[in-house]
Amino acid sequence: MFNFEEDYVLENEVVRLVPLATPQKEQLFLEANEPAIWVYFLENGLGPERFDTYFAHALQQRQQQLEYPFAIFDRRQQRFAGMTRIYAVDNKLEILKIGHTWLGIEFQGTGLNRHCKYLLFDWVFGSLNFKRIGFGASAENQRSLRAMKAVGCQEEGRLRSFMPNMAGTARTDIVLLSLLQEEWLNGQRSRLKASLKL
């Protein structure tokens, strides 16, 4: 069972996921202050004022037991690198979603995201014994969609005309993906583990 009041820590030799907390804010702002990070986000944390609001909202979401934000710490560089969240938790149905994930530009393409996903998936399907993880991304965000498929997620549908497109001239879809416990245990776990960069 997932418990919003518990301080979960997930780690391996490359990454440490820890509950978001105020002392991390300054380091995370330094990584978040890049326009390219926020292109496909409904929330925008670019700049000091917007990041203050974004960060406070993430903490508030945990207090209200709506979302559980993690700070991502790169153990190789000894720096906070970004954030990710668990949300839409249903302990009865044993399902949840993972999203709102971003990494500083310097950490993208380093394998850090795969390490994060491996730890999260193994914990959700192994320790929590949940049956399904859901994901979503703008149809325009091909990089994110490729990354999710690369860690084993399967595309399963769309929410049509969900949000304004990147140019602000029309609307675009949200692509829905998922990973199931049986898929994780029957091959995806070993495939993702074999692809991790150390």
Image (tube, grey):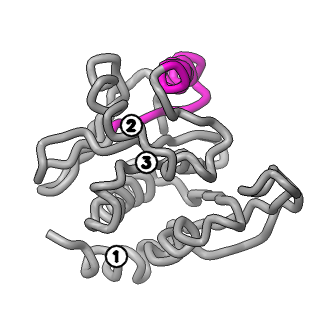
Please name whichever residue, 52 or 196, is drawn nearer the observer in this view of the structure: 52
> Which residue sits at x=44%, y=73%?
151
Whole-angstrom CA distance, mark 3 to mark 2, is 17 Å
> Mark on residue 128?
3
Residue 185 in the image, given as x and y percentages of width and height: 41, 74
Whole-angstrom CA distance, mark 3 to mark 1, is 19 Å
Q: Quadrant of residue 161?
A: bottom right
Amino acid carrying label 3: it is: Leu
Magenta highlight range: 49-71
Depth check, mark 3 against mark 2: the one in front is 2
- Residue placed under numbered mark 1 in the picture: 192
Q: Quadrant of residue 196?
A: bottom left
Secondary element at tag 3: loop
Residue 107 in the image, given as x and y percentages of width and height: 29, 56
Amino acid carrying label 2: it is: Phe
For this view, does 94 lie left or right of residue 8?
A: right
